């Protein structure tokens, strides 16, 4: 069974381009949407993403919408706890493929890490 986990130095989720996420207002509170939009920098990348280290500069204090946690996904997307693993794997795969491609090192690392 595949088990979701974040892979280090990927950062695909840090590509925040609102044009690629037209339904933001459906799952973000108004103040979260404002924060989200304020975090979008050059090329759609989060202003807190360090492109050199490929890590988040505010990871410990990142906003709720940047967290893969049971309560967050249940509240934001209506995902039940028992569905989170598969949902998170699907979301990450889609995001990684969209940002880096379906044959990228990042997708290969992710698939290997989660057991696909």
Image (spheres, rainbow, N blue to C red):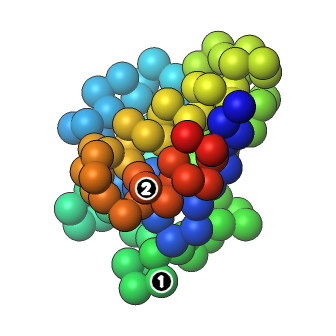
Spatial CA span between label 2 and label 1:
19 Å
- Where residue 39 appears, x then y in whole percent? 42, 58
Is residue 30 at all visible to an observer of this figure? no
Q: Which residue is mark 2?
A: 108
Disc 1 is placed on an element classified as loop
Disc 2 is placed on an element classified as helix
Asked if residue 91 is positioned above or below residue 98 in the image, the reply reads above
- Where residue 51 appears, x then y in whole percent? 38, 78
Crowding at label 2, few (<14), some or many (≥20) Cα neighbours within 10 Å?
some
Asked if residue 64 is positioned above or below residue 109 in the image, the reply reads above
Asked if residue 77 is positioned above or below residue 49 in the image, the reply reads above
Q: Residue at x 73, y 66 (%)?
A: 60
In-image side of 9 versus 83 (left or right):
left
Choose the circle earlier in sequence order: 2 or 1.
1
Q: Which quadrant does the C terminus fall into?
A: top right
Q: Residue at x 58, y 26 (%)?
A: 87
Q: How many marks?
A: 2
- Where residue 26 appears, x then y in whole percent? 45, 19
Q: Which residue is mark 1?
A: 53
Q: Residue at x 38, y 36 (%)?
A: 94
Closest to the observer: 85 or 64?
85
- Where residue 52 appears, x then y in whole percent? 40, 85
Which mark identifies residue 32? Answer: none
């Amino acid at each position: 069974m595949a088990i979701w986990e974040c892979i280090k130095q990927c950062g695909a989720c840090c590509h925040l381009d609102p044009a690629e996420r037209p339904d933001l207002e459906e799952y973000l509170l108004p103040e979260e949407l404002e924060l989200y939009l304020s975090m979008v920098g050059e090329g759609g990348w989060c202003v807190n993403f360090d492109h050199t280290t490929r890590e988040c500069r505010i990871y410990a204090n990142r906003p709720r919408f940047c967290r893969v946690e049971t309560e967050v996904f249940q509240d934001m997307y209506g995902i039940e706890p028992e569905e989170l693993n598969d949902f998170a794997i699907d979301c990450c795969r889609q995001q990684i493929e969209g940002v880096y491609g379906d044959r990228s090192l990042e997708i290969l690392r992710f698939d290997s890490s989660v057991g696909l």
